[in-house]
Amino acid sequence: MADGDMTIGKPISRIDGSKKVAGRALYAAEYDAPGLLHAAVVSSRIAKGKITAIDAIEALALPGVIAVLTHENRPRVAAFRYAYKDTVGPPGGPFKPLHDGKIRFADQPVAVVVGETLEAARDGAALVRITYEEEAFETDLDAAKAASFRPRLPRLGVKPAPKPRGDFDAAFAAAPIKIAAAYETAAQHHNAMELFATTVVWEGEDKITVYDKTQGSQNVQLYLKQALGFKLKNVRVVNAFVGGAFGSGLRPAHSAFLATLAAKHLKRSVRLVLTRAQMFSITYRADTRQEIALACDAEGRLLAVRHACVAATSRNEDQQETIVNWAGLAYACDNAAFDYQLARVDTPTPGDMRAPGAAVGVHVLECAMDELAYAAGIDPLDLRLRNWVEHDQNDDLPLTSKAQKACYAQAAERFGWSERSFGPRTMRDGHELIGWGVAGGVWDAFVAPVPTRARVTWRRDGRLEVAAAASDIGTGTYTILAQIAAEAFGVSVERVEVRLGDSTLPFNPVEGGSWMAASTGAAVAKACDKLKAALVKTARKQFKLRGKSALSVARGAVIGEALPGGAVSLNEILAAVGQDIAATGTNLPDLAGQRKHSSYVHSAVFAEVRVDEELGVIRVKRIVSAIAAGRILNPKTAGSQIIGGMVMGIGQALHEEAQTDHRFGKVMNHSFQDYHVPANADVGDIEVIFVQEHDPDVSSLGVKGVGEIGLVGVAPAIANAVFHATGKRIRSTPITIDKLLD
Amino acid sequence: MSEDPSAMPLQLTVNGEVRDLRAAPWVTLLDLLRETLQLTGSKKGCDHGQCGACTVLVDGRRVNSCLILALTRDGSEVTTIEGLAKDGALHPLQQAFIEHDALQCGYCTPGQICSAAGLLSEGQARCREEVRELMSGNLCRCGAYTHIVEAIETVRLSGAEAAA
Ligand code: FES
Ligand code: FES
């Protein structure tokens, strides 16, 4: 790329790529410090009860072990639950690690062993003997849902179930064609590749730098300050590189608390890394039980919609997601009813995982639409188009844009949908049954609900620096922010340096819900405008220009006829000033606009599966997904985001489930061997299409965000393809062989 | 820190450099690389041989370094991701991974690239399907698989790895 080229919208390779492929990107567990100690966590063997005795003698006798911290001997920490609140948690009282001897869920951390080496800490943790008194517990949602309830306090930023409209009961009773079905979705674990890890560098009296695996450095900073009694300015949290998170790093993890607790106690630097198994006790995507009822007339027009859900939550907090709302939003329907309830189980609090709510809610809706299509004898794609709506009926607001028709058309064309035969079990290739399925996807086009800031600096070394306390969890944030700044100054991306993932940088909320591109991106654009104005002003002063002579910034220079030679490079201007020049931009959420219209991002997904008739083995042969997400800043990194979502959708459809043995209240498959995430050979051909969508109202850059939508619609497209192949409607994810052969 | 009395001597050639080291019998090659040598390019995703993030080349063969006790490889030659680039130029696979966007968070990436390098020198993979199958020991939760296969295929078909 040369100076002056347009960079926004170009498929630029990620600017942090060379560090990552060379092993030079440092993640939380990879920072060193003088005299660094290692910590390991001891996990509870029981799911509920209390600790009656702790025997750490053997552990402490192990060479290299220097401390065993438990609730009995830990330093003083905050007692009140509000001190443990973070900026994104749901209503309720957060879990307080090592607070008391009570056990609330299996694998709860009960002790931290600190050693001179990784091995000493790990082996010491195996030697701590803990005696428990067990209590009765419940981890089975099917049993717990007898006591389900509607959440009393809504969760900030999550829409409660919509109000009913029309008369569902009467319309459903009178309708000629209808379906009603119960669905189950399994609990899933994020399982990012990087283990949860925290390196706390003790910088001297009560001052720490914390390298942490998190989606929000400033969220963790605030949490550690409150829970562990540091001064805010003495806590710096760094997450420059994050090895995936998918929502698991939205809230501060107990590993960050425990590592900092140990460092505070010993006044030394400490690194704590959880094991893969222990990561299953941080948070998870709640399992759900859902009921859906749809009715239509002979032409396929929806007459009645009802969607109800019971989702798992913990004893102490009310995790909430938007699950049933989509049924009132995706298609035109005047008679609709909704119910969203929670049921308490003895587990850690479930949390957001990629496309929270929509992943499971839209799954059920889109499977049910397929059921209705077969009940009505209408092509499933056609049924969706016959119920087209461009108005948000839940909130009675117009949509800023919805290019989903183009998604359906382009993806169907690419996939070859017109070649499909309607009947189940009508397509085969030897002993393999072929199935083609379709589903639509929808997700919020969020803009961060709080002000988002960024600072842009033109440096004397001729480089443009962008700085924000945003996170790049693999999403491409580094790259798109560089593109936005490069374009504003008309310079090549190579001249831009982006600093992210540091709590000392300008304020950003936690990275989640795909709002970063729209919000932080807009803050960078605003900062660039301010910086350009400041540079123009400086040039005016330097060249003593009076009056209205027009000046502008392009190609890294101030340009104007009044200037010597018509242009002066920014470097020259700065050399004369003798210092870097910076400006900070702030993006505010458009609250007035949000009351006037709704914004969503949409997709259309087509999947082909092959099912071995005798063995029941399902393979995903290919998926085509078309996405309408407003302006795409970088089709290369955005395309990867979509593909990543699609791969996780394959996992949701076919592989992923936490298998809890309810006799022990414990997830038994807590490893990569037993909790299968899609591997290379599980993923067939994948194609992503971005359709044109111009939406100036959704955000100042016209961006909607692409982190979640790639996942939504994939699992139902696969499930519908499995029905088409086999004639079997499996209403429970994941669709495993046993269910298919049952 | 006082040295562990159980530590024993071992010699490894790591990325072309002979290193005389000491390690306790229970220290894995991965932990030795990451903790003692500060070669943190090799990642830990499971510590159980189930994810491939720790893949390095030992005497030219790809292995899960979390499953290997360092002392058992006395005298071996180890190549990690830090050693793949030659004279400041990225290995063709590293270059292809960037170009094809075969990474997102980047955490599985060093393991993927070392595994791919091993795969290409094994000469086993002759088509995309085989690459998919033979790269299935390296998980990528970001789901970059299709791009990973494209990157490897580009290098395989160009024969560039032979020259590297
Ligand atoms: S860390 Fe070695 S295979 Fe996962
Ligand atoms: S790039 Fe994130 S796990 Fe592969």
Image (tube, coloured by chain):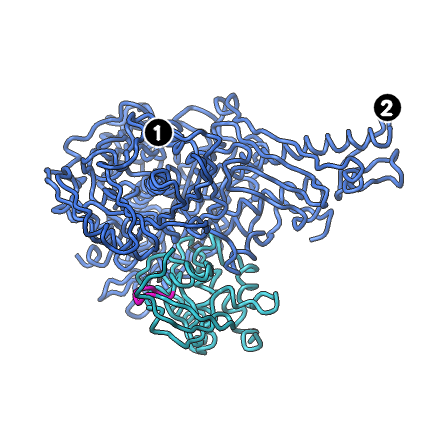
Chain colours: A blue, B cyan
Crowding at dot 2, Cα within 10 Å, few <14 / some 14-19 / many 20+, comes out as few
The image shows residue B80 at horizontal and vertical percentages of 47, 66
What amino acid does circle 1 point to? Lys
Which quarter of the rendered picture does the C terminus of chain A lie within?
A: bottom left
Q: Quadrant of ligand 2?
A: bottom left
Marks 1, 2: nearer the viewer: 1
Disc 2 chain ID:
A
Q: Counting residues from the N terminus, which is met first, the one under dot 1 or under dot 2?
A: 1
Judged left or right of residue A6, residue B104 is left
The image shows residue A291 at horizontal and vertical percentages of 23, 37
Question: Residue A585's quadrant in the figure?
Answer: top right
Up/down of A88 relative to A124, above or below: above
Residue A503 colored in magenta in the image: no
Disc 1 chain ID:
A
In this view, the residue in front, A301 or A481, is: A481
Q: Which residue is the site of mark 2?
A: A547
In this view, the residue in front, B77 or A706, is: B77
The majority secondary structure of the magenta stretch comes to loop
Q: Residue A85, which numbered label?
A: 1
- Residue A358 seen in the current view: no
The image shows residue A586 at horizontal and vertical percentages of 58, 29
| Label 1 close to label 2 by CB (< 8 Å) | no
What amino acid does circle 2 point to? Gly
Crowding at dot 1, Cα within 10 Å, few <14 / some 14-19 / many 20+, comes out as many
Magenta segment boundaries in residue numbering: B24-29
Up/down of A222 relative to A665, above or below: above
Up/down of A596 relative to A418, above or below: above
Find numbered disc 1 in the image and state the secondary structure of the residue it sits on: loop
The image shows residue A53 at horizontal and vertical percentages of 14, 41
